[in-house]
Amino acid sequence: MGIDPGHNGRNYTDPAFIDHLIWNGREQETCDTTGTETDGGYTEAQFNFNVARFLALDLQAAGAKVILTRTTNDGVGPCVTARAAIIDQAHADVAIDIHADGGPAGGRGFAILEPVPDGPNDHVINASAAFGRVLRNRYRALTGMPVSTYDGVDGIADRDDLAGLNLTTVPKVLIECGNMRNATDAALLISTSFQELAAKAFTQAVIQYLRAAG
């Protein structure tokens, strides 16, 4: 299982590195960003990392081998291309990029971002979509977070501008777990109990997907 906790806690300290351009399979994008934060200053990088740690522990307890693209929240990077390569080279059975959104303050909810055919990922498009549906259903049912009111359709959005999805050679989706700029979502996202629940939903989705995939 591949887990990519988006961003990193000290990305803001090295803008020259974070802002340098990489090739995402279709076009240039920056190596990474700092991510968003709540109005109270709780960072997306910290949320992503906390959920990833809980998820890794849950999956390891279930007997899974886990690969993380970063193991601390006090570093810089790696670039989004390197994150994709780490998971691809591990030949993960399935992978998830963990994020939280910085959407309009009036918008609520989560969205599953899925790859579109791009060459390297052609053979995992259908599998990624299947995992995305399972993940959407488990996350919505277990956490009570609604699907996004401003992104995608019924919680699903196709994306061709993200290196992690464009360059994946394993089934993978990216989840925006909620909107950090919305007060209602933010109050949930900063809660340790919600972060643990999110990880539990991810674990259930991974197990359900892998069982169905055989």
Image: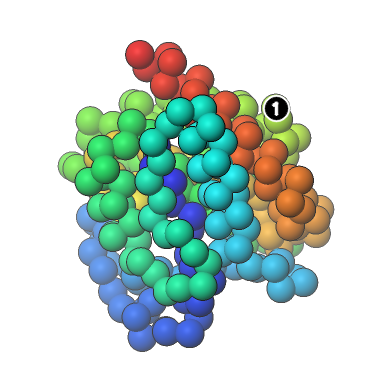
Q: Where is residue 119 in the image (x, y as percent from the top left)?
A: 18, 42
Q: Residue at x 35, y 52 (%)?
A: 164
Residue 30 lies left or right of residue 140; in this view the side is left
Residue, x 22% and y 46% (percent of image)? 89
Which one is in front, 202 or 104? 202
> Which residue has dot 1 on it?
141
Q: In this view, does 144 lie above or below 68?
A: above
Residue 153 percent across, percent down from the top left? 56, 36
The number of callouts visible is: 1
**Image quadrant assignment for residue 101:** bottom right
**Residue 210 placed where, x, y %?**
42, 21
Residue 112: x and y, percent? Answer: 52, 40
Label 1: how many Cα within 10 Å (few below 14, some 14–19, many 20+): few
Question: Which sits in the foreground, 101 or 74?
Answer: 74
Quarter-of-image position of residue 200 = top right
Q: What residue is drawn where x is 55% and y is 50%?
A: 53
In the rendered image, which quarter is residue 19 located in? bottom left
Is 180 above or below relative to 74?
Answer: above
Label 1 secondary element:
helix
Q: Is residue 115 visible?
A: yes
Q: Residue placed at 51% from the left, 27% from the top?
A: 62
Nearer to us in this view, 169 or 51: 51
Above or below residue 33? Residue 93 is: above
Point out the image quarter for the N terminus.
top left
The figure's colour scheme reads: rainbow
- Image quarter (top left, top right, bottom left or bottom right) of the C terminus: top left
Does residue 154 appear in the picture of this structure? no
| Amino acid type, residue under disc 1 in the picture | Ala
